[in-house]
Image: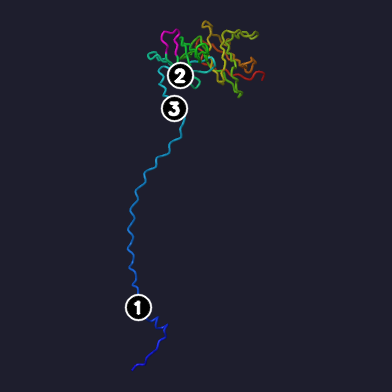
Amino acid sequence: MKPFVLLSPALLIAACATAQTAPTPPAPPAAPAAPAAPMAPEPPVAPAAAPAGPAQQAPVLPLRAPKTFICSDGQTGTIDHDEAAGILRVVRDGEVLALQELVGTTPKRFVTGADTVDLDGNTAIIRRGFGRKAQAVATCKQLPDAPVRGTIWGTVNKLDRMALPSGSKVKVLLVDAARADAPGVELASISIVTRGNQVPLNYLLTYPENLEPKPMTYRLQARIEAPDGKLMFITDTATFVLESEKPQPPVELMVVRAGG
């Protein structure tokens, strides 16, 4: 007979708990996660709208037979008369005007808004305003296609950087300087009044066609006066013209500050 072993109550309770508790089997490995569904591509983002710019002008129709004009303020302009359509297009001083002819007017008159142009042969008078308040902006003369007798044109220019005040008066003279011991005799002249525009200033001078060409006889002179009449600039060199039978080519006149 085997000896009987008496266990303490604490050991007995621990043994019973061990016998009743079954070992927990290891958890099966987790199934691999299903691959994520591909994301739908995002719609393209529309480009940002460009900032609003200045209002675009209506396209200007091409000129058919443009003619160059020299105006009383020393600026040039381009005028195109479409007789079939009764339209006059004027490009001058940064502006483009399209004017409609008024039927039955003499000289021919063209209007658009507050602008009016009277076209009489080779002369165009540009006005701005309505009714009696309309003011002449410039009187323009058509430039010949090539030098011709009876006409001299060119520019008045200066190296001085001083700006001319608006309302400056420019005068170009053709004088007979045959006699060195006597003042030149004025034969023809043209006046220009500026409107804030600067050099070069264009001039178109007409003279008697019966002048007999002579060497060192006819001379061009130019002067610029302030609006109050004070002399500002003047030519200081002799510029002889009409020395041969050939028409006079364009002449640039350089002026210097009066009084040195």
Looking at numbered disc 1 in the image, what kind of residue is underneath it? Gln
Q: Position of residue 104 (x, y in %)?
A: 41, 8
- Tell me where the magenta segment starts and ends, as one range: 101-110
Q: Earlier in the sequence, mark 2 or mark 3?
A: 3
Q: Position of residue 179 (x, y in %)?
A: 62, 8
Q: Earlier in the sequence, mark 2 or mark 1?
A: 1
Q: Nearer the viewer, mark 3 or mark 1?
A: 1
Q: Which residue is mark 3?
A: 56
In the picture shown, does residue 70 fall above or below 20?
above
Q: Is residue 72 left or right of residue 21?
A: right
- Dividing the picture into quadrants, the one containing residue 186 is top right
Q: Secondary structure at mark 3?
A: loop
Q: Which mark is residue 20?
A: 1
* Towards the viewer: 199 or 73: 73
Q: Which mark is residue 97?
A: 2
Q: Position of residue 201 (x, y in %)?
A: 55, 18
Q: Nearer the viewer, mark 2 or mark 1?
A: 1
Q: Secondary structure at mark 1?
A: helix
* Towards the viewer: 4 or 174: 4
Rendered-image quadrant of the C terminus: top right
- Dividing the picture into quadrants, the one containing residue 167 is top right
Q: Secondary structure at mark 2?
A: strand
In the picture shown, does residue 25 fall above or below 226?
below
How packed is label 1: few (under 14 Cα within 10 Å), some, or many (20 or more)? few
Looking at numbered disc 3 in the image, what kind of residue is underneath it? Gln
Q: Earlier in the sequence, mark 3 or mark 1?
A: 1
